[in-house]
Image (cartoon, rainbow, N blue to C red):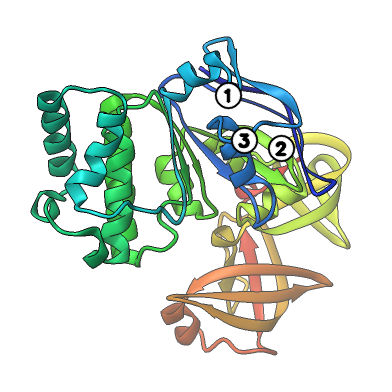
């Protein structure tokens, strides 16, 4: 188990990590999420015993460890960090992968066997004798991943490992990382801002904001049960509103919105963009929330379009395919109906 207790970090007189407490259990794939500059990389460096925190401690299986001390060195052998822009040593792919094994005194025959195994696992065997100076960006990333994994660490820390990869290579890397985690059962901790990666890889995670943990827990809960407007907005819900609750209804401005809970007082509600349906007529459906509105804007996002609709002063965002947008002839100023199920509403 990897545990971070009351971690704080200060750089140039500025506190950039503020009282972080996190626990990563054996076999978990822990995802660190948050906007650029929130402290994800700094926290990974502390967890990997590369940097010493200004306050707090890192524990592995209950044993405190810190950089430079004997306990830290013992733990350090169980922890490997792969940074976003890895640096390879001069030489071949194979010599890079074997380097860490030789440094740890692994015998030549065993080092060769483990290197062959990881080359095969990551489909790098055909590049074994290639000089690293001739590799593409994706090949460099996979070689660095192989160099980290050949050590069979108990804890692998990954700092946005797919950011520089093209879409196809990114999918391939995610599949390989997921397969290796299932095979080895080690603790994987990855910093990312890609929600698809987070949902497909993570078992647990944390959303960070300004050096603090905004919310931590099971990965599904972060996306389906946000506890703050920041978490709800960050994980892409798209529609987050202040609300006054009365039983199974909530008032947002002048709109009464049905939700699946039973609560009173003030709070927030959120509706995923994908749950918001747009139609040209007031259809009779099972969706309990239906409001007339006017399209304010349409913005492209790859094959999906984001529509912003003004319903009595409440701006709803809906995510539609480009084909559906054209089929409905949607454009700014068009009168439409917005609808969504009560069960899709999250409250906090």
Q: Mark 3 points at which residue?
A: 51
Image vertical order of residue 33 relative to residue 247, above or below? below
Q: Which residue lies at the image location 57% right of the left edge and 38% below the top edge?
A: 44
Q: Is residue 304 left or right of residue 183?
A: right
Give the spatial CA distance, label 3 vs label 1.
10 Å
Q: Is residue 280 left or right of residue 82?
A: right
Give the spatial CA distance, label 3 vs label 2.
19 Å
Q: In this view, does 112 lie to the left or right of 33?
A: left
Q: Name the residue under label 1.
A: 68
Dot 1 lies on which element? loop
**Could you say which quadrant of the image residue 108 lies in?**
top left
Q: How crowded is mark 2: few (under 14 residues within 10 Å), some or many (20 or more)?
A: many
Query: Which is in the foreground here, disc 1 or disc 2?
Result: 1
The foreground one among 136 and 342 is 136
The foreground one among 42 and 326 is 42
Image vertical order of residue 146 relative to residue 134, above or below? above
Q: Residues within 10 Å of mark 3 (few under 14, many from 20)?
A: some
Considering only order in the chain, which callout, 1 or 3, is on the residue closer to the N terminus? Answer: 3
Query: Which is in the foreground here, disc 3 or disc 1?
Result: 1
Callouts 1 and 2 close, C-beta under 8 Å: no
Dot 3 lies on which element? loop
Q: In this view, does 226 lie to the left or right of 106?
A: right
The foreground one among 153 and 73 is 73
**Could you say which quadrant of the image residue 62 lies in?**
top right
Q: Mark 2 points at which residue?
A: 213
Residue 274 drawn at (x, y percent) = 54, 60
Quarter in which the C terminus is drawn: top right
Residue 134 drawn at (x, y percent) = 22, 67
Dot 2 lies on which element? strand
Considering only order in the chain, which callout, 2 or 1, is on the residue closer to the N terminus? Answer: 1
Residue 277 drawn at (x, y percent) = 57, 66
Give the spatial CA distance, label 1 vs label 2.
27 Å
């Amino acid at each position: 188990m990897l545990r971070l207790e009351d971690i704080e970090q200060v750089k140039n007189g500025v506190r950039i990590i503020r009282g972080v407490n996190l626990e990563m259990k054996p076999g978990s794939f822990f995802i660190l999420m948050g906007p650029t500059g929130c402290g994800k990389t700094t926290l990974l460096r502390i967890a990997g015993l590369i940097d010493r925190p200004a306050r707090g401690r890192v524990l592995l299986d209950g044993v405190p460890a810190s950089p430079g001390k004997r306990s830290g060195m013992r733990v350090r052998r169980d922890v490997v960090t792969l940074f976003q822009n890895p640096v390879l040593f001069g030489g071949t792919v194979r010599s890079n992968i074997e380097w860490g094994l030789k440094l740890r005194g692994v015998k030549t025959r065993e080092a060769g066997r483990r290197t062959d195994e990881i080359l095969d696992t990551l489909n790098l065997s055909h590049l074994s004798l290639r000089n690293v100076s001739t590799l593409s960006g994706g090949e460099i990333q996979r070689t660095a991943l192989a160099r980290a994994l050949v050590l069979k660490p108990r804890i692998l820390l990954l700092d946005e490992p797919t950011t520089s990869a093209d879409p196809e290579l990114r999918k391939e890397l995610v599949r390989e990382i997921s397969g290796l985690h299932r095979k080895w059962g080690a603790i994987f901790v990855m910093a990312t801002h890609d929600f698809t990666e987070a949902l497909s890889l993570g078992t647990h995670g944390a959303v960070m904001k300004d050096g603090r943990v905004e919310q931590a827990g099971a990965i599904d809960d972060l996306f389906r049960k946000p506890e703050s407007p920041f978490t709800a907005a960050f994980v892409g819900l798209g529609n987050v509103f202040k609300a006054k609750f009365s039983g199974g209804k909530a008032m947002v401005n002048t709109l009464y919105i049905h939700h699946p809970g039973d609560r009173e007082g003030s709070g927030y509600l959120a509706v995923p963009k994908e749950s918001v349906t747009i139609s040209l007529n007031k259809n009779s459906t099972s969706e309990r929330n239906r409001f007339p509105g006017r399209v304010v804007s349409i913005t492209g996002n790859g094959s999906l379009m984001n529509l912003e609709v003004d319903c009595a002063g409440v701006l709803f965002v809906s995510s539609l395919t480009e084909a559906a947008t054209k089929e409905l002839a949607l454009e700014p100023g068009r009168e439409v109906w917005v609808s969504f199920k009560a069960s899709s509403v999250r409250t906090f």
